[in-house]
Image (tube, grey):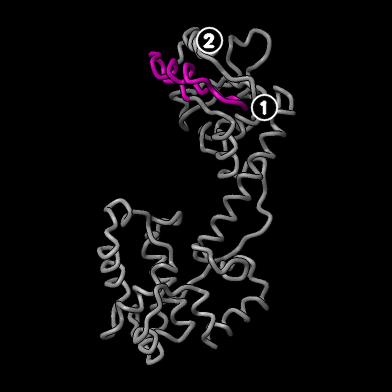
Amino acid sequence: MDIPDFQTLMLPVLRSAAKDEVKISDVVEQLATEFKLSLEERAQFLPSGRQTTFANRVHWAKSYLGKAGLVELTRRAHFRITDRGREVLAAPPERIDIKFLNQFPGFQKFRDAEEEEGDAASPHVSDNATTLTPDEVMRSAHRQLEVALADEMLQRIRSGTPAFFESLIVRLLVRMGYGGGSVTDVAKALVGGPGDGGVDGVIDQDPLGLDRIYVQAKRYAAGNTVGAGDIRDFFGSLDRFKATKGLFVTASTFTSSARQTAEQLSKRIVLMDGDQLTRLMIFHGVGCVIEETLHVKKVDEEFFE
């Protein structure tokens, strides 16, 4: 089954504390078993790699129950049900969700405070039926922004000159750590032009220059894919340079036969299409700048011990 959303977990989390004080990590394990999550689902981490998705959603469910006054913190990583929470369980609804919690003054006050801050990322501000936690909403919005950014960058790349595209590839490789510090001038790594032998760039793979990567860059339009013939031609170019490794980059895509050909050839040829190119550019800060930085903070548990 899919990992339950945090609102689905609210009633089970409240029930887990019905008898006595509970530890949040124990609740996570208990509910993972109750919902019959697979090992893969239990081990699925957030993008930060610091917490599993399921544990994150259990924590958010507990937090929202606390805002409504149904549970309360007792000590580090522990909580218990309140009298109000017991009243809810005495005649439990089929489901506890944000809409249900709106009846409690404490939760309503919490919502009002967020609305005054203009917190558009909070899921219940715009849609009470959402299944996403606030940080999942934030990550989803971040992904949407990056998809839009990648699309705009790709359009600009395709409208540029072949020389700019070749320079871009070398700049990206240098930012990724290739060049070994020896490429102080990107122009030195660019060899494209008449008589280039089918290679647009050459860059050291390691600081000592013991190995080199040969680059072919094809700034094709979206509908103009790179085929197997282009890969075989690049293979021949690598052979002439006695090279063992090559990188073929395009602003479009590769056909399945092109990818299959690259896998079957005796030399290591890595293929990078437009989507992968823009993802790497964004990750390494090439062709884009940080507009705003948001710091997401959490409670320092050691401070309150």
Residue 224 placement, left or right of 18: right
Quadrant of the image containing the C terminus: bottom left
Residue hosting label 2:
229
Q: Position of residue 28 (x, y in %)?
A: 31, 68
Q: Is residue 268 above or below residue 236?
A: below
Mark 2 against mark 1, which lies toward the viewer? 2
The 10 Å Cα crowd at callout 2, few under 14, some 14 to 19, many 20 or more, is few
Residue hosting label 1:
165
Residue 75, visible in the rendered structure:
no
Relative to the observer, which residue lies in front, 99 or 37?
99
Q: Is residue 185 above or below residue 20?
A: above
Residue at 63%, 24% (x, y): give it: 188
The mark found on residue 283 in the picture is: none
Q: Position of residue 147 (x, y in %)?
A: 61, 44
Magenta span = 245-270
- Amino acid tagged 1: Phe
